[in-house]
Image (tube, grey):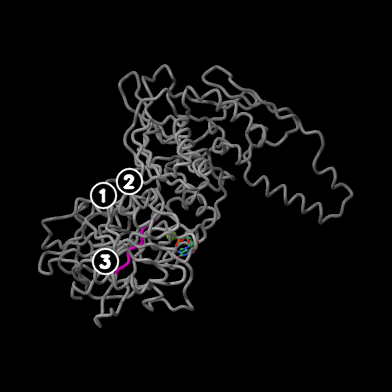
Amino acid sequence: IDQQRIRNFCIIAHIDHGKSTLADRILQATGLVDDRLMKEQYLDRLDLERERGITIKAQSVRIPYKAKDGRDYVLNLIDTPGHVDFSYEVSRSLVACEGALLVVDASQGVEAQSLANAYLALENNLEIIPVLNKIDLPSAEPERIKAEIEEIIGLDCKDALLISAKTGQGVPEVLERIITDLPPPMGDTKAPLKALIFDSWYDTYLGVVVLFRVVDGRIKLGQDILLHSTKARFEVTKLGVFSPDPIALNELGPGEVGFLCAGIKILTDARVGDTITDPDNPTLSPAPGFKKITAMVFCGMYPVEPNEYGTLKHSLEKLQLNDAAFTFEPETSHALGFGFRCGFLGLLHMEIIQERLEREFQARLLVTAPSVIYQVRTLEGETLPVDNPSKLPPLNKIEHIAEPYVHMEVHVPNEYLGAVLALCEECRGTQKDLRFLSSTRVIVTYELPFAEIVYDFFDRLKSVTRGYASLDYEFIDFRPSELVKLDILINSETVDALSIIVHKDKAYAQGRELASRLRSVIPRQLFEVVIQAAIGQRIIAKERVAPMRKNVTAKCYGGDITRKRKLLEKQKEGKRRMKRMGNIDIPQEAFLAVLRKD
Ligand code: GDP
Ligand code: MG
């Protein structure tokens, strides 16, 4: 294809501003997806994404389009995920594009990720077309939002598009503007093959599928390719495009976006960001690649039944094939037995993996409270990464504990500023900047420990601002903090899976809170259960669960058999997520009690 007839673009937006809906309308307006077959959020591949209304994995689609100028074009829409946990996926999708549609909800205005994603696009030299969405809403204020975009992001909004992705109004104009305003690719057809991998996943039948963008040269079915960073060689056995279903092709040229299979067995052989080239005539300018993504949030995952360990391991391996950001390794817990320490980008990522394990693999899991990763400096001068509070070395061996810090921007209407500042201060934040976007909106910048925002920061921010604040964050570094390990003892025995690391100043309050929350989730037993919170040898809180008075099944005696069976069934279901420790049943809720702050 003539590069003049190609447009590669992505849609960037703050979550819920309408990116997926606009993608759907584009697929429909160009006739690529039949109205009858149109499912909402067509590109969101996983059921889970569709249900939760979030886009996790980037997906791209080739769209043939006949423009008003009478010519046939090829549009490549590269979908990008819309949640802070996945911002690394946004940046990798951008390298495949020349331009971006910046979708801003005309009733909400610029939010934290509108800004963060717009900056990412600008850093990648993308041309940006501002698109104001949801103009069908009575609360839409396109003129005010245009001014906001100009002021905050610095984009000219004179010709900003006004659309409703819901009704389809303005969508044909979006397509025309993609043709007129976005530059075509400018690859060198004669140069050696250079193609960038921007996504890859494992398919049970095909093995590793690689999604790439050809920068220079051509790639042909059957040819040998060289992966720049690993120097591994493969033969291209399948080549094609998604449109939206796979279409096989013999060749792809500069500017084109497609997929290939080449008998690649493991995902790490086809790293996102790597350059594909020709082994006989390699490119002299491979892309620098992406920085390795590292998991920042960890939790333990344990099978409810010990004999399901092998199945769980197998399921985790399968999930990892498609998610390079997810890590796991075996761990043992005194309380929970054999399981795995799993690493994630953030809490949402963790919830998604957990849900997929349960749904797609029917895994029955006990999940421990998430923890960030710490860097512990020992007196011997060693630095140890610690991703499990119970694995913290003894205090008398530690020089200091450093925790990950993030740089965070919160966008908030004026009237909630006080509440947001109070929340950030409470979360050990240091204010770095405070800027008024307009007379009504403010951006506050804080540096704060990631641990403080992992648990329930989003929920609390939402509740103190009635949902009007938005945020974006990125990691900066590890900083020493006064941290201590808080242990939980049940009937005088430390339960390793319940230990957490907390700041010294908050340890007492958290210990008391956690003990009392545990009291409400641990069911009564035949005997008294004593719950204690301790820092080192010091007990800082104590709660009791009184013994059971009556036998639950007693009321069934004499009752009819089906009722009895039902009750037993119900009890069995309830026990599904219990772990027997010594002689006490501890339910799943207990392990996540630390997450809930009311
Ligand atoms: P994303 O998170 O950016 O992908 O946003 P979605 O496309 O999932 O849209 C978020 C919500 O806004 C959904 O409930 C959509 O139905 C709704 N929405 C999207 N576009 C419009 C629009 O033009 N008008 C109205 N009224 N609602 C819209
Ligand atoms: Mg979406």
Distance from the alpha carbon under mark 1 to that under mark 3: 20 Å
Give whichever of 587, 221 is nearer the camera.
587
Name the residue: 47% across, 29% down.
501
Residue 297, image x, y percentages = 43, 40
In the image, which residues are magenta?
76-81
Q: Compare residues 160 and 183 and report the one nearer the observer.
A: 160
Q: Hey, which quadrant is residue 95 in on the image?
A: bottom left
- Marks 1 and 2 in Cβ contact (< 8 Å): yes
Asked if residue 545 is among those painted magenta in the image, a careful observer would answer no
Q: Tag on residue 293?
A: 2
Judged left or right of residue 33, residue 124 is left
Percent from the top left, x then y, of residue 296? Answer: 39, 40
- The amino acid at mark 1 is Phe
486 vs 577, nearest the viewer: 486
What's the residue type where badge 3 is placed?
A: Asn
Q: CA distance from mark 2 to mark 3?
A: 25 Å
Q: Which residue is mark 3?
A: 8
Q: Which mark is residue 290?
A: 1
Label pair 2/3, CB-CB below 8 angstroms: no
Find numbered disc 1 in the image and state the secondary structure of the residue it sits on: loop
